Image (tube, rainbow, N blue to C red):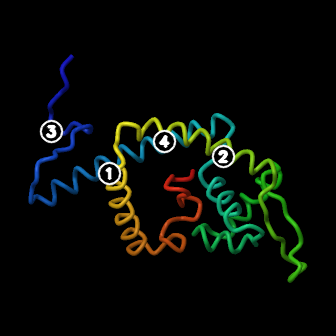
Amino acid sequence: MPEDPRPDDDRRVDDRPSGDRTEAERLLRRQLDRLWVRQTLRTVLIEQSGGLDPTARVILRAVERLGEVRSTAVAERTGLSRPVVSRRIAGLVEAGYVRTTPDPDDGRAALLALAPAGRALLDGLDAQGDAVFDDVTSVFDGDELRDLARLLARFNDRAAEVLGAGGEDGRPLGEQSEGGRSVP
């Protein structure tokens, strides 16, 4: 069956140079929508296979990167509210993914750290993500991947400026990259 050449086909991106910014923005939005749908489906698959929901993953990644840390610092670095972080941390502790110890500077507060089960879970998610990432990116050469990374970095940096959210580099802490790869 021949490919449908309709101009509103979501798969089609016109490579022709054009001064029509409105059309270019429409094409970008369409591709970002497709990417968002795939990310949403990926999230559902992770949850169905025993993984964590996106908020819990962001919190677990923050604890991983920050080391022993108070939940208030996790809330500040991720942009999540303190009550949300507090509730999610309780679930992560109960599941054995995060451990708590008394804060030596303030006995009323607790420090959070990644537990061995949390480390194992993140390692498993990384392995799954690496396999899918390798498969998706296998059709691009190194220059294309660098161009895409450069453009997405500019896009993310500008989004962080406009929205005023994210970690030090403008991205939520749980979504920062390691070694050039996005971490779930």
Query: Closer to the observer: label 4 or label 2?
Result: 4
Left or right of 175 on screen, residue 10: left
Q: Nearer the viewer, residue 87 or 58?
A: 58
Sequence order check, earlier mark of 1 and 2: 2
Identify the residue position indicated by label 4 in the image.
133
Residue that numbered label 2 is attached to: 52
Q: Which mark is residue 49?
A: none
The answer for how far apart the CA atoms under marks 4 and 3 are is 29 Å
**As shown in the figure, which amino acid type bears the numbered disc 4?**
Phe
- Residue 134 placement, left or right of 107: left
CA neighbours of label 4 inside 10 A, class few (<14), some (14 to 19), many (20+): few
**N-terminal-most mark, 2 or 3:** 3
Lower sequence index among marks 4 and 3:
3
Q: In the image, residue 16 lies at what x, y percent? A: 11, 48
Which residue is tagged 1? 143
Residue at image coords 59%, 38%: 128
Q: Give how far apart the Cα atoms at labels 1 and 4 are.
A: 17 Å
Q: Which residue is mark 3?
A: 7
Query: Which of the pair 86/182 is nearer the observer?
Result: 182
> Which mark's residue is nearer the viewer, 1 or 4?
1
Report crowding for label 3: few under 14, some 14 to 19, many 20 or more residues within 10 A (C-alpha): few
